[in-house]
């Protein structure tokens, strides 16, 4: 449910619209999934409480890799608003890698998006034609281990435990803003502005000697169109050349760990050392929503760690001093693992 074409243009007005729908759904006496489509991070504090929503959109449409990057950077700051069993941050739909779709990603990006959505306990809604999914996409979206990460009984949203990305401040998104304008609308506007500027310049040139004042008007219009086109390009979402490691607590004293390389050009080898691994495995021990869980025990600190690669299907055994290393190609490749302790007879 979104507020497109609503006469309310203020934040409070939008919240009132959603609140009206929320109350109407509640009055039916039925269990209904209420998904709020609000586009901005400021919906998160109101999602589960005032709006009683099941999920709430927190960013612009995920219609290109740059917008997916911004959704990830936005959602990393909203972990505290995801309420286990109540409601969740929604970074928008999953995109397949079919080149025939209206919007699509590279195969590596589509898999990285799916893995990150699972780490963020996000709704797994596929915005692609089910009749046109490649073998790669089917392997991506039908992977039971990744789905289990998203649907883990703890339902806690993961968060970065390492990031080389610059500080990010979410913008207030609206449909026609340059930074959140849908990619196809952006291309339409840029082409239209270019054609208008060319036409206005041609008219100004043809009438420059007969009616100079009118020619100046057309010249001004052409200049304004070109400047506005440049502004649209300037404010379009961009991807920083950086990397992140995400961790998510899982039931059974386990954790999920994800490495991602956002760099558009550079491949990189990433490392999660013993401190990083133990941080991932103890992340939920400090969570106020799970007071019954405690810091790592001495047995856990001396135990080996089993790292299972969810797509490669292999397991690596790490000692308490080992690092988990992965090599990632540029432009959005990611790798996701589950971590759990493996005890020897002397460490129990």
Image (spheres, helix red, strand yellow):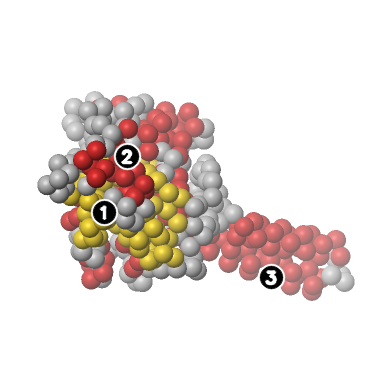
Secondary structure, mark 1, is loop
Write down the residue under mark 2: 283
Q: Residues under labels 1 and 2: Cα distance?
A: 19 Å
Mark in front: 1 vs 2? 1
Where is mark 3, residue-wise? 198
Query: Residue visible at 60% across and 60% down?
Result: 233
Relative image position of residue 149 (x, y in whole percent): 23, 49
Q: Which mark is residue 319?
A: 1
Q: Residue drawn 42% across and 44% down?
A: 76
Q: Nearer the viewer, residue 197 or 321?
A: 321
- Residue 139 higher or lower than 287, as above or below: below
The answer to whether residue 196 is left or right of residue 250 is: right
| Residue depicted at x 45% and y 33% | 14
Label 1 or label 3, whichever comes before in sequence order: 3
Disc 1 packing (10 Å; few <14; some 14–19; many ≥20): some
- Residue 17 in view here: no
């Amino acid at each position: 449910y979104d507020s497109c074409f609503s006469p309310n243009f203020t934040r409070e007005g939008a919240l009132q619209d959603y609140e009206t729908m929320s109350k109407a759904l509640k009055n039916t006496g039925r269990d209904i999934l209420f998904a709020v489509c609000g586009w901005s991070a400021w919906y998160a504090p109101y999602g589960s409480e005032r709006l009683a929503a099941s999920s709430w959109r927190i960013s612009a449409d995920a219609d290109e890799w740059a917008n997916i990057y911004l959704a990830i950077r936005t959602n990393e700051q909203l972990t505290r608003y995801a309420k286990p069993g109540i409601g969740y941050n929604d970074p928008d739909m999953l995109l397949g890698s079919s080149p025939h779709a209206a919007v699509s990603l590279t195969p590596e990006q589509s898999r990285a998006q799916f893995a990150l959505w699972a780490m963020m306990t996000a709704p797994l809604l596929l915005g692609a034609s089910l009749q046109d999914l490649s073998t790669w996409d089917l392997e991506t979206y039908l992977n039971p281990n990744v789905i289990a990460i998203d649907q883990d009984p703890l339902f806690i949203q993961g968060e970065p435990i390492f990031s080389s990305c610059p500080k990010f401040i979410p913008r207030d998104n609206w449909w026609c803003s340059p930074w959140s304008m849908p990619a196809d609308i952006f291309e339409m506007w840029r082409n239209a502005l270019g054609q208008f500027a060319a036409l206005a310049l041609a008219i100004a040139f043809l009438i420059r000697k007969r009616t100079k004042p009118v020619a100046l008007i057309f010249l001004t219009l052409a200049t304004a169109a070109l400047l506005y086109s440049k502004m649209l390009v300037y404010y379009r979402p961009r991807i920083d050349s950086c990397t992140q490691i995400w961790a998510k607590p899982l039931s059974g004293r386990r954790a999920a760990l994800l490495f991602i390389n956002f760099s558009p050009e550079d491949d990189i080898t990433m490392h999660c050392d013993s401190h990083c691994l133990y941080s991932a495995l103890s992340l939920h021990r400090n969570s106020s929503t799970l007071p019954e869980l405690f810091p790592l025990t001495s047995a856990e600190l001396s135990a080996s760690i089993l790292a299972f690669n969810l797509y490669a299907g292999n397991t690596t055994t790490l000692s308490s001093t080992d690092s988990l290393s992965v090599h990632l190609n540029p432009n959005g490749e990611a790798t996701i693992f589950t971590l759990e302790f493996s005890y020897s007879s002397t460490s129990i």
